[in-house]
Each structure stands twice: as C-alpha cells, then as structure tokens.
Image (cartoon, grey):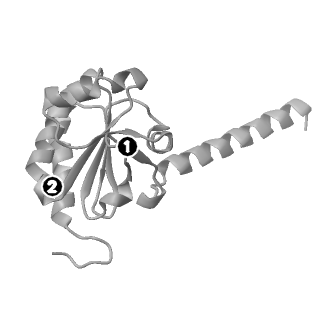
Amino acid sequence: MSRTLKLSLALTIAAATLLAALLFTTCTPRPPSALGGWVQGNNQHAKLADYKGKVVVLDFYATWCEPCRAETPHLVNLQKQYGDKGLQVIGLNVGGDDDRAQVAAFAKEFGIEYPLAYPDDDLVDQLLSDNQNIPQSFVYDRNGKLIKRFIGFESSGAAQIERVIQQALAANTIAGQPAN
C-alpha cells in the first residue's frame, strides 16, 4: 500500500471516529444532575435538578435578538397560564456582557415574571455546542428528562411548544413517586 493511500485511510478513519464521538456526545441526553447551571439575579446558583417535580423550559435568548423578542410574550403567557400547574420558564441570557445591562428593561417591557439568569459556560457548551442560534428552548419533564428542543421561533411553532408543555404537565409523574 502506498504511503499516500495509508495516510488517506488513516485520516478517513480519524475523521469518522471524531464524527462518531461528536454525534454521540451531542445526541446523548445528560441526566439533570450532569447539566451545568445558571446564576440568577440574586447571585444564587441554580440547576435543572433543583426543579424536580416541575416541567421546565430553559429558554436561551438575547434582548437584541428579534426572534427572541417575538417569542418572549408567548413564554410570558405560558408561565402565567401553566405556572400553577407546575410549569417553570427560565430565561437564560446569552447576549454577551453588553446585553446584561439591558435585561432589567427587557423584563419590564415584556412583563416577565419568570426568572431571568445567566447560564454557566458549561451549560451553554452542553446544550448549544452543535447550534448556537437563538432563541432556543429546551422543554424538560418533571424528572428533568429532555422532551423537546426548539430552535428559533416562528408564530406557527408557538402552538407546538404549548402542546409539548401540556402533555408534560398532564403526565404528572415524578420518578419514584406515584401520580397524583
């Protein structure tokens, strides 16, 4: 076998191995305890596992992002409509250091009553490593299992996220505990 053919074969195998590893790590859901967390406005650190028993929507946004701004009223309404049934929306700002100063005005403008926080770099790497487009919303069931990921926002998709949330709330089961 020629040296060029050996090198080409070795590079192909290495690329295939790297691709397989990348696909495995980005497609394998992590348990809630393995996910990174976020820092809330009161400088308290939180993570998904802290919300066991609730259906959680982690929404990655920026105040300057037009699709994020279009999505926000929908999230505000979902929190108001389903919050007492066990939904918790959490807004995670990934707009950069300059955007942080805009968050309070953004919350006031849209009447946001759900927590707004700043994700740890580890959480961003875990959830957005394969696609950094925003907004992105991750819907987790009451056990912290990822149900659905939504990338971008279109008004036609608003009903789909609501259906996913309704189904998760209706399931009303927490691992190790009987349904109510």
| Picture quadrant where residue 2 is located | top right
Q: Would you call the spot at circle 2 few (<14 residues within 10 Å), some (14-19), or many (20 or more)?
A: some
Mark 2: secondary structure: helix
Residue occupying the point 35% across, 30% down = 134
Real-space Cα separation, disc 1 to disc 2, in angstroms = 31 Å
**Tag 1: residue type?**
Asn
Image quadrant in which the C terminus is located? bottom left
Q: Please state if 39 lies on the left or on the right of 77 as rendered.
A: right
Q: Quadrant of residue 168?
A: bottom left
Q: Quadrant of the N terminus?
A: top right
Place of residue 127 in the rendered image (x, y in percent of width and height, measured from the top left): 44, 43
Q: Residue at x 48, y 57 (%)?
A: 34
- Name the residue that disc number 1 marks: 43
Q: Residues within 10 Å of mark 1 (few under 14, many from 20)?
A: few
x, y (%) of residue 62? 32, 27
Please count the marks in the image. 2
Residue most extreme to the front:
42
Query: Secondary structure under badge 1?
Result: loop
Q: Is residue 46 left or right of residue 74?
A: right
**For the residues carrying marks 1 and 2, which lies nearer the camera in this image?**
1
Up/down of 163 relative to 153, above or below: below
What amino acid does circle 2 point to? Gln
Is residue 145 something that shows in the picture? no
Point out residue 156 in the picture as x, y percentages from the top left corner.
Answer: 16, 34
46 or 129: nearer the viewer: 46
Q: Nearer the viewer, residue 3 or 112?
A: 112
Residue 19 can be seen, yes or no: yes
Which residue is under mark 2?
166
